[in-house]
Image (cartoon, rainbow, N blue to C red):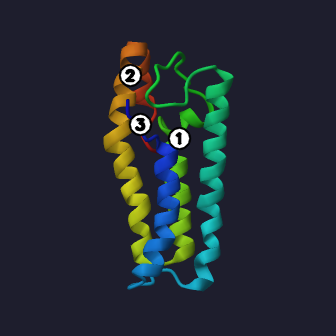
Amino acid sequence: MMKRILPPTYFMIGSILAPLFHYLFPFIIIIKSAYRFFAIVPVVFGIVLNIWADDLLKKYNTTVKPNEKPTKLVSSGAFRISRHPMYLGMATVLFGESIFLGSLSSFIVPVLFAVLMKTKFIPKEEASMMKAFGNEYCMYKKEVKRWI
């Protein structure tokens, strides 16, 4: 049986691809070096959001893995900001990395990551949540946006 590649692996690949794209295809620099220190804001935000969401899932003793059955609908903390705060956090870190690098080519990575999460993981996760929690999840979806 083939092991599924999970979102953190895609995140790690993306964090390597962004500088690779920057150095291989630095055609257009869109952020000058004087402004690149602003990258710290999305990087720190993304890291904090991921840790916060992970801690909440552990606190409520439910899975963090998208291919496992959820046992608890967590709707507090980071999950009041986004239905998928860990994907949001990873995409935000990649976005911050692209700001730091400054080239247009590096911004392809966070966009691809977000599209990949939206198409490959989120639909399956949301279907699993709907199956597990029904109307409670429907109400949650009405209150909290998918990303932010």
Q: Position of residue 75 (x, y in %)?
A: 55, 26
Q: Which residue is mark 2?
A: 128
Q: Position of residue 19 (x, y in %)?
A: 51, 72
104 sits left or right of 32 in the view:
left
Q: Amino acid at mark 2?
A: Ser
Question: How packed is label 1: few (under 14 Cα within 10 Å), some, or many (20 or more)?
Answer: many
Q: Quadrant of residue 50?
A: top right
Q: Amino acid at mark 3?
A: Arg
Frontmost residue, 28 versus 148: 28
Q: Which residue is mark 3?
A: 4
Question: How packed is label 3: few (under 14 Cα within 10 Å), some, or many (20 or more)?
Answer: few
In contact (CB < 8 Å): disc 2 and disc 1: no
9 sits left or right of 57 in the view:
left
Q: Which residue is mark 1?
A: 85
Would residue 138 be seen by someone viewing this image from the given angle? no
Q: Quadrant of residue 32?
A: bottom right
Q: Residue at x 40, y 29 (%)?
A: 125
